[in-house]
Amino acid sequence: MAFFKNIPFGADSCGMVHYCGMRRGAYERVKAVMAEFFDQETGLILSVLREAAMLAVAVREESALFTVEKSDLSPVTVADFAIQALVSRRLGDVFPDAVLVAEEDASSLRAPDGCDMLEVITSFVSRFIPGATGGAVCDWIDQGAASEGGALFWTLDPIDGTKGYRRGGQYAVALAQIEDGHVIRGGLACPALGAGELPAFAGTGLVAAAKRGAGAWLFPLSSAADPSSAAALHVNGCSDPSKARMLRSFEAGHTDVSALEQLADALNLRPEANVLMDSQAKFAVLASGGAEFIFRLLSPERPGYKEYIWDQAAGSLVVEEAGGRVTDLKGDRLDFSQGRRLLKNTGVVASNGVLHDAALAALQMLPSL
């Protein structure tokens, strides 16, 4: 019973021990699945995400938010670069042949005007990898610059929700392993996600992780690699769209706000059912039963946009293994075999599964789709 020590046990009227409503036989099956969940790769995901989250927190607390501009004009922080360097090095230590497809590259840091920023990044990385040099940090970052991963590879978003991170909102470190176009392991470290959004643990900072066929699990950030601190994640069973909640991005430029409002009307959602939240932390909330819908619609400012794989890989697996469903806007499964983007998919819809067909039907009613 140590696996679930943070959740109390009880006994029913027949004297059968249960966990969250499960009789002993069901509990033993869950415990067996939990044992299947922990292998070398998932253990690495959990330990790396914990380190990466600690690094992100340190950077934000110390206000070292130097920025540069990438070619797509989105902000990049010290934490983005430092976390990519750290994760790349940790993966290489355990799996020397691992291929990493990640968001950043070190070209701006290698330029003469990037020296100051590189120095700051290296100082943070050195807290976790003593003796790290600027050259090594750049090399580790660039190990994630692969254009595609092949049959088996990893993908990383070092700071998903950069703007939320900068303003003190939600953000996530997202790491996933992909095989033959399918996510097989993944995790989200959410340092700013706490008891108010996910009531499984007191305090703040959570890691949600999943392994294909072995469920989705929630850990306190402080003990992310400890099996005894795990709690099973599961979506809720809401079957009435009018009682559902939709998680939406703070950034209006990331979606079609007008279409989302039409979608909410089509689903008969209550006005208060719209919850604003940055990053893939939304997937963790949905997987925990804290919401029913997430939609990524095409923004009018970005017609024809295709999602980056690191923005969806880890979160989609967490939701699916928690009993939910994730597809594109047409209902097709997400295909992660097309390189750095989901080229065969348009948009994303995630749900508790029960309401997925209703979501797809409502989407087809939108004139813009």
Image (cartoon, rainbow, N blue to C red):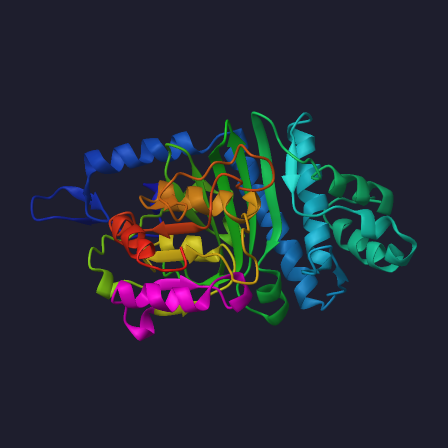
How far across and down, in percent of the image, does residue 276 sit?
Answer: 44, 68
Magenta region: 246-273
Q: With 304 as the anchor, is 102 left or right in this view?
A: right
For the point 40% across and 64% down, the residue is 259
For the point 56% across and 34% down, the residue is 338
Q: With 44 as the anchor, is 39 left or right in this view?
A: left
How far across and down, in percent of the image, does residue 206 sit?
Answer: 48, 55
Q: For this rendering, which residue is in front, 139 or 268? A: 268
Q: With 353 as the anchor, is 101 left or right in this view?
A: right
Name the image quarter holding the C terminus: bottom left
Q: Using the rendered view, name the quadrant where residue 244 is placed.
A: bottom left
Q: Quick check: can you spot residue 346?
A: yes
Q: For this rendering, which residue is in front, 264 or 22? A: 264
The number of numbered discs placed on residues in the rendered structure image is 0
Q: Is residue 88 depicted above or below 238 in this figure?
A: above
Q: With 116 as the anchor, is 127 left or right in this view?
A: left
Name the image quarter holding the N terminus: top left
For the point 22% across and 56% down, the residue is 238
How far across and down, in percent of the image, does residue 64 sit?
Answer: 74, 65
